[in-house]
Image: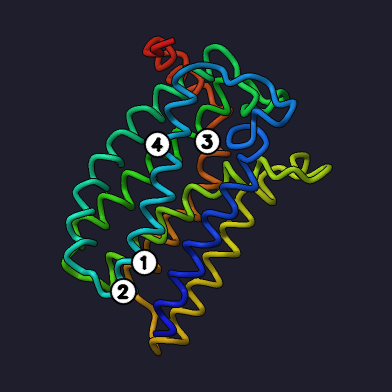
Amino acid sequence: MREKRLYLIAAILFALIVLVGFGRTYYLKPFTSAPPLASWLVVLHGILMSAWVVLFIAQVFFIRTKKIRVHQRLGYTAVALAAAIIVVGFFTAIAAARNGAASFPAEIPRLSFLAVPLFDLIMFSILFGAAVYYRKKAADHKRLMLLTAINFIPPAVARFPIPGWFALGPIVFFGVPIVLLIFALVYDRMQNGKFNKIFVYGSLLLVASYPLRLAIMGTDAWLAFANWLTGFSLV
């Protein structure tokens, strides 16, 4: 029961972080002075990501209430939604790199920063793909799904409406999910008496991706690749 509590807390925290981060610029936009959304792609991307948050919460609820069959059937919806998130997210990031976007830091070249959202999609693909692979091993599956949620936290954290927050850069954008990962790993170890290897490996891979994307984003090879990629934008 205490282990299930971790996922309930994660579901609530995931929703709150997304709401706080994107509230002013997306969910509560009609009531704020936020700039207009860049394109229909951004709107669609927001809808799909919101659906993922709702789906994550729903799946946690179905497990807690022992509605396993409903949880499993909804898993097919998750696969379709994940595919849509990857495709739309890719073209949204490419369009932002070509045309500019409020979500891209002004002090960082757009082609360089493109590495950040693309790595988010790469990590999501790996973690969710692994979760589907281990769907019959509940212990591994649910921990991988938790990692998919943590993977999407940095964009929301970066948008927290706190004075001077954005200027702190990667130390908070990536620091917050790392702290949450450490807490989840320690809590999981305390409840089960041992570390889940898949959870540890997935966490290490996610954490390693943070400095990796920062390291390559300014290289000539990445800039050449990003310049080539921007030719595939839909807008």
Say the numbered circle drawn on residue 48. 4
Residue under label 2: 65
Disc 2, disc 1: CB below 8 Å?
Answer: yes
- Count neighbours of disc 1 (C-alpha within 10 A) and say few if under 14, some if 14 to 19, many if 20 or more: some
Disc 2, disc 4: CB below 8 Å?
Answer: no
**Residue in the foreground of this view, choosing between 39 and 221:** 39
* Rendering colour mode: rainbow
- Report the Cα–Cα distance between label 3 and label 4: 19 Å
Q: Quadrant of residue 21?
A: top right
Say the numbered circle drawn on residue 61. 1
**Residue 142 horizontal/vertical position (percent):** 32, 66
Which mark is in front, 4 or 1?
1
Upstream in the sequence, badge 4 or badge 1?
4
Residue at (44%, 79%) from the top-left corner? 188
User: Relative to 139, is 191 above or below?
Assistant: below
The amino acid marked with disc number 2 is Thr
**Secondary structure under the numbered disc 4 in the rendered image:** helix
- Report the Cα–Cα distance between label 2 and label 3: 37 Å
Upstream in the sequence, badge 3 or badge 4?
4
Residue under label 3: 116
Q: Quadrant of the N terminus?
A: bottom left
**Residue 113 horizontal/vertical position (percent):** 57, 28
The amino acid marked with disc number 3 is Val
- Report the Cα–Cα distance between label 2 and label 1: 6 Å
The amino acid marked with disc number 4 is Leu
